[in-house]
Image: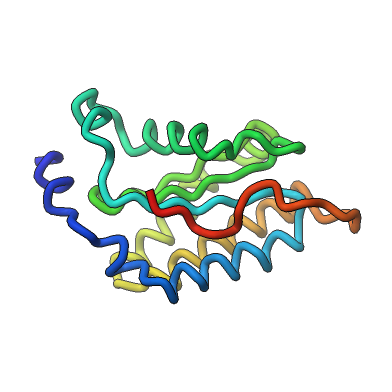
């Protein structure tokens, strides 16, 4: 059944995340990162690579692969957070770098994923994505507040379509 979901996924990403929605997510990430010293990365994938499906990888395992692939772990304060959306499985995973993961319980991330999933189920992809970005930003602002110092943008704010 899992293979069928991936085969049938087609081009959902562009239908559910058109350019206007991607631009809104980009703007939300850019605005949010002025509030904290963290970095947010938003990645959307239609289907998991076949090799990962064949190996029985979960959406969570794939999110960890994407976290590494996009170098979200490579931030100065170890405060990168990946919001990963796997459309074929309607899965949402949040992977946080060790600096923030040590301060935030997994249940808090899971609650955020659940709220996003509810919005997506109601076909509100833009609203769900922006709610997710803002909630991650709130968490980062609490644990890594902006300190007024100038800093570069370590990761692109633009959503990544895999």
For the view shown, which residue lies furthest in the bottom direction?
20
Instruction: Give the total number of marks visible in the rendering.
Output: 0
For image coordinates 59% across by 68% down, the residue present is: 28
Q: From the viewer's perspective, is 16 left or right of 36? A: left
Q: 117 above or below 68?
A: below
Colouring scheme applied when the structure was drawn: rainbow
The image quarter containing residue 147 is: bottom right
For the view shown, which residue lies furthest in the top direction?
55
Quadrant holding the N terminus: top left
Q: 82 above or below 117?
A: above
x then y, percent, for residue 55? 23, 23
Q: From the viewer's perspective, is 117 left or right of 12? A: right
72 or 59: nearer the eye? 72
For image coordinates 76% across by 37% down, the residue present is: 76
x then y, percent, for residue 148? 90, 58
x then y, percent, for residue 22? 46, 67
118 or 39: nearer the eye? 39
The image quarter containing residue 66 is: top left
For image coordinates 87% across by 55% down, the residue present is: 150
Q: From the viewer's perspective, is 103 left or right of 146? A: left
The image quarter containing residue 134 is: bottom right
x then y, percent, for residue 142? 74, 53
Q: 95 above or below 113?
A: above
For image coordinates 23% across by 50% down, the residue present is: 88
């Amino acid at each position: 059944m899992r293979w069928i979901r991936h085969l049938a996924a087609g081009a959902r990403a562009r239908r559910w995340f058109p350019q206007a929605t991607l631009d809104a997510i980009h703007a939300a990430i850019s605005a949010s990162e002025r509030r904290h010293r963290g970095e947010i990365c938003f990645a959307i994938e239609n289907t998991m690579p076949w090799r990962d499906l064949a190996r029985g990888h979960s959406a969570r395992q794939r999110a960890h692969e994407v976290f590494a692939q996009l170098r979200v772990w490579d931030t100065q304060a170890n405060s990168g957070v990946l919001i990963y959306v796997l459309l074929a499985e309607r899965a949402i995973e949040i992977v946080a770098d060790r600096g923030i993961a040590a301060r935030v319980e997994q249940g808090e991330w899971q609650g955020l994923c659940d709220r996003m999933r509810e919005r997506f189920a109601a076909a509100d992809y833009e609203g769900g994505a922006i709610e997710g970005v803002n909630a991650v930003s709130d968490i980062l602002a609490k644990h890594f507040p902006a300190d007024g110092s100038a800093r570069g943008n370590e990761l692109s704010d633009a959503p990544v379509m895999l």
